[in-house]
Image (spheres, rainbow, N blue to C red):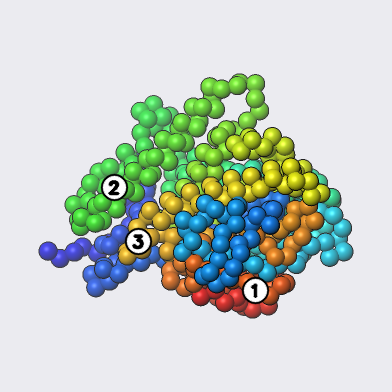
């Protein structure tokens, strides 16, 4: 029987204008390529605030002969899938004559490699970030040029750090030097943005009344499609639908939990109160975005720069930012190390799920580059060199993983960004303070 070929942009359509993008299926490739089907290359940038305890972060050894440090112990199971780098610097996160404000510069310079103008007025200026520079070149290949996610909303006006606008602390993605790209912290809105379901109030009410999933609206189209697919594609489609329903269920559960508990507590509307659940949902939305090829470029802020969130999940009741000024106090440093490890653990759980999504002879992580890091290394000294940077994923076979790479001190972080952008088809000659492309393959 001759295999039917589907267009890569095939989507399921249903009632009330609902639509669902599909994961990459064998049927979307020419018959001659079915046995070696692979996905497009994606890239994401995950930012954490306030630096790290570097003595517990940096691995020992070099090349493939290295040992994970305590913060990265959970990353050991992904040893073959990561490239850990040392020696990278974000020079324009430094003061360079502008005085205090290292946390604001940490976020704003992280993906731009540009010096932010010190102002808390409307005349903000920094630079275009790597995600947006790449999206400008290749974003037309997907329904969404890029996806911006976060945990803290933050503010885009006012003074948040030593005379720097709050916009610098709250954003890592910049469409232009003067315009940050708004991030979404509400899982439901991020999910609906992915699937383009801007429903009328009447339709939303009807869906809530009958508790229907978006998949219920496209059930007929899905049934017609499944009879055209082979066994492998039918199984892949079932797994994908299951993951979509699971996200919907968790969003609904988080919304119900909000309504029930502690009515006098001030909580962000629509955001899960449980931090681990919030982080997991946002990571999963990024995963589904990549799986469906809705976008190939994403950013995720695990906290605004200078975030003073406490982490009772690991018995840290003190504020994160306050602890980062530890003055070598062993107790405070131990608490920060717990936060570092907690956030790394959440990242590793995300990598687990990425590896569980099959693509051809590999998986979704094989066809992705997920950078995890910050533009501050030592939060106490406000150092911006030898940054904590991990790159996970094989970049569709273009990144040599399973190793530690020690680059010369003061190597611009933006050199790595140029290399990543090239691998997703965005050939940039320069960005911020870049001096060339970093060898990572």
**Number of numbered discs on residues:** 3
Q: Which quarter of the rendering shows the N terminus?
A: bottom left
Marks 2 & 1, CB-CB < 8 Å contact: no
Alpha carbons under labels 3 and 1: distance apart: 32 Å
> Residue 261: x and y, percent?
56, 22
Q: Residue at x 81, y 49 (%)?
A: 327
> Residue 167: x and y, percent?
72, 50
Q: Which residue corresponds to mark 2?
A: 238
Q: Nearer the viewer, residue 253 or 356?
A: 356
Q: Quadrant of residue 69?
A: bottom right
Residue farthest toward the left in the current orientation of the protein: 1
Alpha carbons under labels 3 and 2: distance apart: 15 Å
Asked if residue 268 shows in the view, the reply is yes
Q: Nearer the viewer, residue 273 or 381?
A: 381
Q: Which numbered tag is attached to residue 359?
A: 3
Q: Nearer the viewer, residue 419 or 321?
A: 321
Alpha carbons under labels 2 and 1: distance apart: 44 Å
In the image, residue 111 above or below residue 211: below
In this rendering, position of residue 93 left or right of residue 149: right
Q: Residue at x 69, y 53 (%)?
A: 53
Asked if residue 181 shows in the view, the reply is no
Assess disc 3: are there few (<14), some (14-19) or many (≥20) residues with their C-alpha within 10 Å of its C-alpha: many
> Residue 170: x and y, percent?
69, 49
> Residue 188: x and y, percent?
49, 40
Q: Which residue corresponds to mark 1?
A: 407
Of labels 2 and 1, the one closer to you: 1
Marks 3 & 2, CB-CB < 8 Å contact: no
Q: Nearer the viewer, residue 241 or 71?
A: 71
Instruction: Work out whether mark 3 precedes mark 2 in sequence or the reverse, and give the earlier one.
Output: 2
Instruction: Work out whether mark 3 precedes mark 1 in sequence or the reverse, and give the earlier one.
Output: 3
Disc 1 on helix, strand or loop? strand
């Amino acid at each position: 029987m001759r295999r039917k070929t589907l267009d890569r942009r095939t989507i399921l359509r249903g009632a009330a204008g609902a639509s669902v993008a599909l994961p990459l299926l064998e049927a979307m490739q020419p018959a001659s390529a079915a046995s070696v089907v692979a996905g497009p290359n994606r890239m994401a940038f995950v930012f954490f605030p306030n630096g790290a305890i570097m003595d517990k972060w940096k691995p020992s050894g070099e090349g493939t002969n290295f040992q994970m440090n305590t913060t990265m112990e959970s990353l050991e199971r992904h040893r073959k899938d990561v490239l850990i780098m040392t020696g990278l610097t974000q020079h324009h996160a430094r003061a360079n004559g502008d005085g205090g404000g290292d946390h604001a510069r940490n976020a704003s310079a992280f993906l731009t490699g540009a010096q932010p103008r010190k102002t808390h007025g409307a005349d903000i200026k920094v630079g275009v970030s790597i995600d947006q520079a790449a999206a400008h070149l290749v974003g037309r290949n997907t329904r969404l040029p890029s996806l911006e996610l976060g945990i803290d909303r933050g503010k885009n006006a006012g003074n948040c750090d030593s005379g720097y606008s709050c916009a610098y602390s709250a954003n890592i993605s910049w469409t232009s030097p003067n315009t940050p790209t708004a991030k979404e912290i509400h899982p439901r809105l991020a999910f609906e943005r992915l699937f383009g379901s801007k429903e009328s109030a009447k339709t939303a009410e009807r869906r809530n009344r009958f508790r229907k999933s978006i998949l219920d609206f496209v059930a007929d189209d899905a049934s017609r499609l499944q009879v055209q697919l082979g066994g492998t594609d039918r199984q892949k489609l079932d797994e994908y639908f299951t993951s979509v329903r699971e996200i919907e269920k968790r969003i609904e559960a988080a919304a119900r939990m909000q309504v029930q508990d502690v009515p006098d507590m001030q909580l962000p509307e629509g955001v899960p109160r449980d931090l681990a659940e919030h982080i997991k949902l946002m990571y999963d939305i990024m995963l589904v975005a990549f799986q469906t090829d809705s976008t190939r470029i994403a950013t995720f802020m695990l906290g605004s720069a200078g975030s003073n969130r406490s982490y009772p999940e690991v018995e840290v009741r003190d504020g994160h930012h306050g602890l980062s000024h530890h003055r070598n106090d062993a107790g405070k440093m131990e608490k920060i190390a717990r936060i570092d490890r907690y956030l790394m653990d959440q990242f590793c759980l995300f990598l687990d799920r990425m590896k569980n999504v099959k693509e051809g002879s590999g998986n979704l992580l094989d066809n992705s580059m997920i950078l995890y890091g910050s533009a501050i290394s030592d939060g106490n000294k406000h150092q911006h060199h030898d940054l904590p940077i991990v790159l996970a994923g094989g970049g569709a076979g273009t990144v040599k993983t399973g190793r530690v790479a020690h680059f010369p001190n003061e190597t611009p972080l933006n050199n790595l960004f140029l290399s990543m952008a090239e691998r997703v088809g965005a050939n940039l000659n320069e960005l911020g303070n870049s001096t060339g492309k970093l060898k990572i393959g």
